[in-house]
Amino acid sequence: MVCTVCHAQTAPAAPDISVDTLKTVTRELSDDKFEGRAPASETEPAVLEYIVSQFKAAGLKPGNNGKWLQDVPLVQITAQNVKPLTFTGGKQPLSLDYRTDMVVATYRVTPEIDLLNSDVVFVGYGINAPERGWNDYAGVDVKGKTVVILVNDPDWKTASREGPFEGRAMTYYGRWTYKYEEAARQGAAAAIIVHQTEPAAYGWGVVRSSWTGPQLEPDIAGDHMDQSKVIGWIQLDPAKKLFAAAGKDFDALAEAATHKGFKAVPLGVKASTGFVNSIRRQASKNVVGILPGTEKPDEVVLFSAHWDHLGKCDAIQGDDICNGALDNASGVAGLVALAKANVEAGPTKRSQVYLAVTAEESGLLGSAYYAANPVFPLAKTVGGVNMDVLNVKGRVNNFVITGAGKSELEDMVRPLVAAQERAIEPEAHPEAGGYYRSDHFSFAKKGVPMLDAAGGNDLVKGGKEAGEAADKDYVDQRYHKPQDEYDPNWDWSGAIQDLTVYYQMGRELADGTSWPNWYESSEFRKIRDQSRAAE
Ligand SMILES: [Zn+2]
């Protein structure tokens, strides 16, 4: 790659990033009084007030034309009286229970959903990717039918990153959002994903807690009536029973689906379910702060982090508040700490925008809304960093760029990371599709180069074994659970390493004149070139 932005001879000086700020903001935002920061909930005004007070205290100015907040219109749908998901017409009838065996929901803003005797078709990975010569829907009409889909993309088991879908690394075709989008384009009445822990990268508990209770989506004209009636997930065991009832072998068909030319298989059974929806329309808010630039204030560098979390969730040991201390009170604390350090260092030539977005957990809704309705034109948004979960395991020897090989921002951070005597390493779990799973993706989709990178698992104290164990403990015991709570014993020295890199990269961008782009091979390059050319 030709690096067009590696002109800086010296990195900006190391900032003074306050551990006290990181601790205070994380502890406050994850307090039980905010009840887990669900968007559009009763506690939202108090959460916003706290974030605004912290932005103000850091020395930022209101960033939305003199206001701190940006309205994000949302509609909340809560499914009630959910009937079992039944399959009839096979060797024996099958009835799957809500929450334990399956979850169902809908994007459609409508009071009642009824799926009755809908023909079931197994569509493999449910991918239609003409540019990769792959179409799981070829030769099959699924209009009004129920499609059963595998999670991730067909070559996720590959050890390398070579393959029709980049091998082990997940592409966007592997994400559940894509599966439902494509099923709707094909006219399916219902789209059901088979949950498998490894390719999904999380357990059934995460599916259950994320897909039951109030669901949020953008409040737009048309009320999403172009989407499938029913979207949902089923556990692996019931899926196997479904295939057996249809006289098919799940493992054999799942294997067949990994090969090019796979043909969708009608299962010869019919699916039924139904539920009623309570519907509430309400705006949530993004918080926008700015440190205005001195020479080119209309060109902006972006720092983002989501403030929302899951709110009240399934109780574990009597605790039903999903506090989201690491996810993502810590990221908002990172915004405040970076803002403080930058204000102290003095304004930059370009503006710096600090964006705390809502409804990330509901599908990146706050960032997608900002990207569709930007306060500062995206063509003049130079690039930035998103923070979602800071490192509280302590200092590490490595630095991992999620979805590496995408943009020239990577060339900018390389010397900054090297100066910390850290090594840049590939993602440990590229199959998890990390780059598509937080707010930077909303901006990338619209062409703005955004870095998603942080310290890895090679702990200075304890090495990779201890680091991997700490990561596993987080994913198994705390991720999206009430146990994601503030711990005064956390070691923030690793977060300081990362925030230093973000600060220095941000400073270099904001005091410079460069326009780092996506690499030629990136799926986002064309969008950026078009957006910049129109400027
Ligand atoms: Zn998060």
Image (cartoon, rainbow, N blue to C red):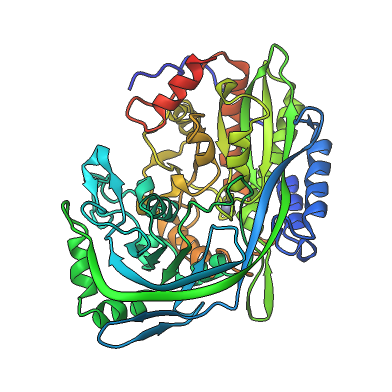
Residue at coordinates 45% horizontally, 39% vertically from top-left?
422
In this orientation, does residue 522 appear?
Answer: yes
Q: Is residue 344 left or right of residue 105?
A: right
Where does the image place residue 89, in percent across and percent down from the top left?
A: 29, 82
Q: Is residue 19 left or right of residue 204?
A: right
Residue at coordinates 24% horizontally, 68% vertically from top-left?
266
Residue at coordinates 24% horizontally, 49% vertically from top-left?
135
On the image, which quarter does residue 82 sit in? bottom right
Q: Is residue 94 left or right of residue 421?
A: left
Instruction: Name the foreground residue: 131 vs 325.
Output: 131
On the image, which quarter does residue 198 sit in? bottom left
Instruction: Name the foreground residue: 259 vs 455.
Output: 259
Q: Quadrant of the C terminus?
A: top right
Q: Quadrant of the N terminus?
A: top left
Where does the image place residue 458, in percent across and percent down from the top left?
A: 44, 51
Residue at coordinates 28% horizontally, 57% vertically from top-left?
141
Placement of 205 over or under 447, stated as above or below: below
In this orientation, does residue 17 appear?
Answer: no
- Give the number of marks: 0
Where does the image place residue 57, in percent across and percent down from the top left?
A: 83, 38
> Which residue, as the protein is rendered here, is positioned at the far bottom?
92
Where does the image place residue 425, in percent across and percent down from the top left?
A: 38, 42
> Which residue, as the protein is rendered here, is positioned at the far top?
295
Instruction: Name the foreground residue: 87 vs 355.
Output: 87
